[in-house]
Amino acid sequence: DSKSRGNWGERMAEDIIDFIGLKEGINYEKQPTTKSGTHPDFTFILPKKKKINMDVKFPLKNYKAYLEADDKEIKKNKKKAFFKDVKVKVKEVTSRDYIDPSSGTLDYVLLFVANESAYTFINEEDTSVIDEALKQQVLLCSPLSLYAILSLIHQSVNSFVIEQKTSEVLKQFRNFTQEWEKYKKKTKDMGKSLQAAINHFDALDTTRKNTLEGPLNKIKGITADVQGPPDEKLDG
């Protein structure tokens, strides 16, 4: 039934998302609520607070009937019904606020065709359907093309993060350079101060010490002359 096909399409989309490495809550949200209360199946988060919505519910009932029919007339009618379903689905997607630049969305919405052969069938049998969808800003994508689109999104997000991180690293490097120059100046000034202290200490320990020891030695000599030898003091 249609619900099972919808669940199957959602599961296939999740498998592709998981394989690429996108993380829920970081790279995408599942069935978020828009301003008008609608719920896109997936919303992919892009750099600079942008996002793009995707709907995975796609009408495949008449395509399946077309494949199973043996009668040419029935196949013709089922084919016609299938393309009508596709056009109705495209219109349905555009009637919702899945495209809402005021909320940060891109100008396009993704419509996932969870069957590679069905997507190929649309391209081969009526290319105007794809063109008309694009005019309405709806991008139909198969499993393979969704993989390519989401890989590109993932790469752009990573590149943006790296760019942001690089900018922060350069900013901190500039701060470090400024502080390093201040540090070098302070250590140089301290070195000069320490050298001056050493020079002063050396002067005290040599020149000033020797200068002080000169008078001191003379005082000792005079004192020795006054006192004289012990025997001379007794005689006097």
Image (spheres, rainbow, N blue to C red):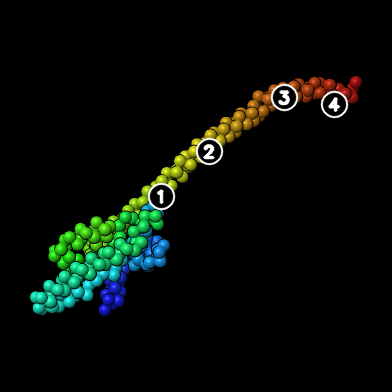
Answer yes or no: do the residues labelled 4 and 1 have beta carbons within 8 Å? no
Between disc 4 and disc 1, whose residue precedes? 1
Kind of residue at disc 2 = Tyr
How far across and down, in percent of the image, does residue 222 sit? 80, 21
Q: Is residue 25 left or right of residue 205?
A: left
Kind of element beneath mark 1: helix
Question: Can residue 189 be spotted in the picture?
Answer: yes
Kind of element beneath mark 2: helix
Label 4: how many Cα within 10 Å (few below 14, some 14–19, many 20+): few
Tell which of 27 and 131 is nearer to you: 131
Of circles 1 and 3, the one toward us is 1
Res 98 quadrant in image: bottom left
Q: Which mark is residue 212?
A: 3
Between disc 3 and disc 2, whose residue precedes? 2
Q: Is residue 220 left or right of residue 124?
A: right
Answer yes or no: do the residues labelled 3 and 2 have beta carbons within 8 Å? no
Label 2: how many Cα within 10 Å (few below 14, some 14–19, many 20+): few
Q: Which mark is residue 183?
A: 2
Residue at the spot 13% in from the left edge and 65% down from the top edge: 125
Kind of residue at disc 3 = Leu
Between disc 1 and disc 3, whose residue precedes? 1
Cα distance in 3D space between marks 1 and 2 = 26 Å
How far across and down, in percent of the image, does residue 60 sit? 22, 72
Kind of residue at disc 4 = Pro
Residue at the spot 26% in from the left edge and 69% down from the top edge: 58
Q: Residue extending furthest left?
A: 72
Against 97, residue 163 (above or below) is above
Res 195 quadrant in image: top right
Q: Which residue is mark 1?
A: 165
